[in-house]
């Protein structure tokens, strides 16, 4: 019985994960770039544990999640021993806040911007934005760090997960109507193709269009050029795990809130059925 329940649970989980990954393109960022839908895996504690480990190993050199204390991670099923051994590099007590060791001044000096605390970033930016951001780094030789980002133009953060993702080439296709300077009337169309190759060299090609497009459009795509240590799908999953962890960090009780909500609604439905049955019983002699 127990093993049947277990396998049902696992099956449910894979269905939910598959659904989450197949979700279509979502909203549009302020920069005009379409955001990809972040798979929601908040019910998945193993994914959250992976996200926590990634965060501690790859992000905390520059960012803190100061609203969390290390021992809060035990709620994700991480034991105290594992926590102390593998997840606490700069802290000695499990009750300490998850602070970065980098000073704000050093961050400003090295990257031109202080890496912000990420406790609430999933709530301020949104999960889809974060998911697109972590997968949106491209080489740009004009930037001081050599990196740029499709949803955060001229970002100060380098692509710290580059070794996993590998080298890519970004192509941006833009079409726009061309206006006459004086009359502001549409006099033609233009297509601009910008490519940032794997080394960050930029080439721009402009073409005249025979027919003016009705609206300006912006499309972009990445092409893999050299392999990273993870496949594209695995890299997406890493990004999803990180986003998921940041979402949990912003509101650790949200899964519980959702579950409680289901119980409360169920309770109200039953109460309504009882109240309705009682009303019928009270009024049956009058009607
Ligand atoms: C080498 C230092 C460094 C590391 C490591 C690093 N970041 Fe950053 N990050 C920055 C800097 C600097 C900024 C500020 C960029 C700016 O404002 O231009 C930033 C900005 C961000 C932002 C945008 C925040 C906002 O709302 O403006 C997010 C999200 C982010 N980092 C996530 C991460 C994640 C997730 C990791 C771990 C995988 C990570 N960072 C690792 C330096 C770093």
Image (cartoon, grey):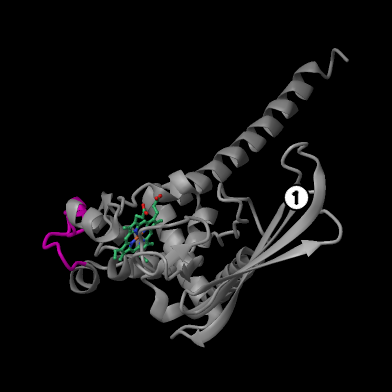
From which residue to which does the magenta span run?
88-104
- Give the residue at mark 1: 178
151 is higher (above) or lower (below) than 280 = below
Q: Residue at x 34, y 52 (%)?
A: 118
The picture quadrant where one finds residue 95 is: bottom left
235 is higher (above) or lower (below) than 261 = below
Q: In the rendering, at what x and y percent does residue 46 appear?
A: 42, 69
> Quick check: is 254 in the magenta stretch?
no
Categorize mark 1 by other alpha carbons within 10 Å: few (<14), some (14-19), many (20+).
Answer: some
Q: Nearer the viewer, residue 176 or 180?
A: 180
279 is higher (above) or lower (below) than 120 = above
Q: Nearer the viewer, residue 50 or 258?
A: 50
Quadrant containing ligand 1: bottom left
Q: Nearer the viewer, residue 20 or 133?
A: 133
The N terminus appears in which quarter of the rendering? Answer: bottom right
Q: Main secondary structure of the magenta part?
A: loop
The picture quadrant where one finds residue 24 is: bottom right
Q: In the rendering, at what x and y percent does residue 83 appear?
A: 23, 68
Q: In the rendering, at what x and y percent does residue 243 appear?
A: 45, 60
Q: Specify the farthest residue to the front.
A: 182
| Relative to 241, 15 lies left or right | right
Q: Is residue 42 visible?
A: no
Q: Specify the farthest residue to the left.
A: 92
């Amino acid at each position: 019985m127990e093993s049947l329940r277990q396998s049902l649970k696992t099956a449910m989980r894979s269905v939910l994960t598959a659904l989450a990954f197949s979700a279509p393109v979502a909203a549009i960022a302020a920069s005009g770039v379409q955001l990809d839908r972040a798979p929601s895996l908040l019910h998945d504690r193993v994914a959250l544990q992976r996200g926590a480990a990634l965060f501690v190993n790859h992000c905390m050199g520059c960012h803190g999640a100061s609203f969390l204390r290390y021992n809060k991670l035990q709620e994700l099923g991480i034991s105290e021993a594992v926590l102390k051994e593998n997840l606490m590099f700069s802290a000695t007590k499990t009750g300490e806040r998850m602070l970065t060791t980098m000073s704000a001044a050093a961050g400003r000096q090295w990257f031109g911007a202080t890496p912000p605390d990420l406790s609430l970033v999933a709530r301020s930016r949104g999960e889809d934005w974060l998911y697109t951001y972590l997968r949106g780094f491209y080489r740009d030789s004009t930037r001081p760090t050599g990196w740029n980002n499709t949803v955060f133009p001229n970002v100060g953060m380098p692509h710290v997960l580059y070794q996993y993702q590998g080298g890519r080439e970004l192509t941006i296709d833009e079409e726009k109507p061309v206006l006459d300077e004086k009359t502001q009337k549409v006099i033609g169309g233009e297509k601009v193709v910008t490519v940032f190759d794997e080394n960050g060299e930029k080439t721009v090609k402009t073409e005249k269009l025979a027919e003016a497009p009705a609206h300006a459009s912006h499309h972009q795509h990445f092409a893999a050029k050299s392999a990273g240590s993870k496949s594209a799908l695995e890299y997406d999953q890493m990004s999803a795990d990180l986003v998921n962890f940041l979402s949990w960090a912003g509101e650790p009780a949200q899964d519980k809130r959702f579950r409680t909500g289901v119980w409360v609604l169920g309770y109200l439905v039953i109460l309504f059925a009882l109240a309705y049955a009682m009303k019928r019983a009270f009024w049956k002699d009058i009607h």
